[in-house]
Image (cartoon, rainbow, N blue to C red):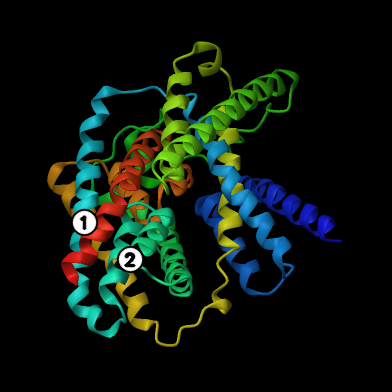
Amino acid sequence: MNVLTAILLALFYCIAPAGVLWLCRKVKIIGKIGPILMLYFIGAIIANIGVLPKGDVTLKVQNLLSNAMVPLAIPLMLFSFTFRKSETRDQLIAMITGLLAVIIAVVAGYPIFGSHIPDAPKVAGMYTACLTGGTVNMAAVSKMLGVEGQQYALLNTYDMMVSFTYLVFIMAIGIRLARRWLPVKTLDGYDAEAVREGMEDASRNPYKGMFSARGVSHLVRLLAVTLVVVGLSAGIGAGLSKLIPGTFMMFFILAITTISIAVSFWNPVHKLEYGYDCGMYFIYIFSIVVASMADVRALDFSGAIWIIGFLFFMEVVSLSLQLLSARFFNVDADTAVIASVTYINSPPFVPMIAASMRNSRVLMPGLSIGIIGYAVGNYLGVLICTLLS
């Protein structure tokens, strides 16, 4: 019975994006909302109305799919990548200003919220690590600071809830607002004004022809190369993490990105069709799975209002500072937003937001910035805790 439940649940997660994509092409208003946001809404709804099977089976399926989809998507989306040296200026500025924005937001919010939060310096340090790197950094810093497992789990849950709200805001109106206020560069062959207004034709079906003989041939080769890249990257990550404990995710993402970029220069792979769209579909699956894990009913809000308020303050202030610095340095809108998302939500969410933007150009900058965040997150977390103690 458990096996059947797992199979049916996995099939639902894998097929649901196809249904949403069909609706986006057929229903104009849904097409304007976009598949990513629609899948997020559907996932959040099913998570909180009690229709998902209860127990470890559901959690195992969710963890398996959420952990597998992004590593598979990144190579597929990068194989068609073409490096442009002219874009490095904006990436570097966004990376530095994004880190500074998080640090300033944490330090500015501490006097307001710190006195109401038990072990406030440790909480600030853990969230600094999380908002510059990711959950893996938060877990590492919690161990370094001697935080109990139960407290860490609760703080991590609050972060997931607030970060989910942040992502919905970014996808619903944040990207559009940033494009109205900051420069917009030409993206993926569409003129800047069309991107600014979000007027890409939602009725276009990028998967048409994918299952023809030619399409299947291309997909088989792409997936074979992808599995090799992921396997090699996992081996590299596992090996290096033995030398430096707690760094598997950082080295894993770094290896996937580096090897995928190297492979993208190999014409037999670079010229294969449907890689980007196949990677996008994996991100659609990731979107609905992650959203369906956000069960608000399971949260205990008693005494947590100040921690949640602190998180909201940090994320709002860091995003605002990121956009202000982008305006000052003339950084384009999508690079600024993807940098903020990378820091606040971690690199696995970069492909999802790049897909929501309909801009594959920001995929590489987002992943690069995220790797830096993974590398410095632990140091910054401990530093902030020490300074505020």
User: What is the quadrant of the N terminus in the image?
Assistant: bottom right
Point out the tag, 1 or 2, that comes first from the N-terminus: 1
In the image shown, does 113 or 312 lie closer to the viewer?
113
- Residue 217 appears at what percent x and percent y? 70, 19
Q: How far apart are marks 1 and 2 (CA)?
A: 23 Å
Q: Which residue of the protein is positioned furthest toward the left in this rendering?
A: 328
- Residue positioned 27% across, 85% down in the render: 116
Q: Where is residue 178 in the image (x, y as percent from the top left)?
A: 29, 51
Position of 135 with respect to 41 (left or right) is left
Residue marked by disc 1: 101
**For the residue labelled by badge 2, is the local secondary structure a helix, a strand or a loop?**
loop
Q: Is 22 drawn above or below residue 381 in the view shown?
A: above
In the rendered image, which quarter is residue 309 located in?
A: bottom left
Q: Which of 20 and 1 is in front in this view?
A: 1
Can residue 212 be spotted in the picture?
A: yes
Q: Name the residue under label 2.
A: 145
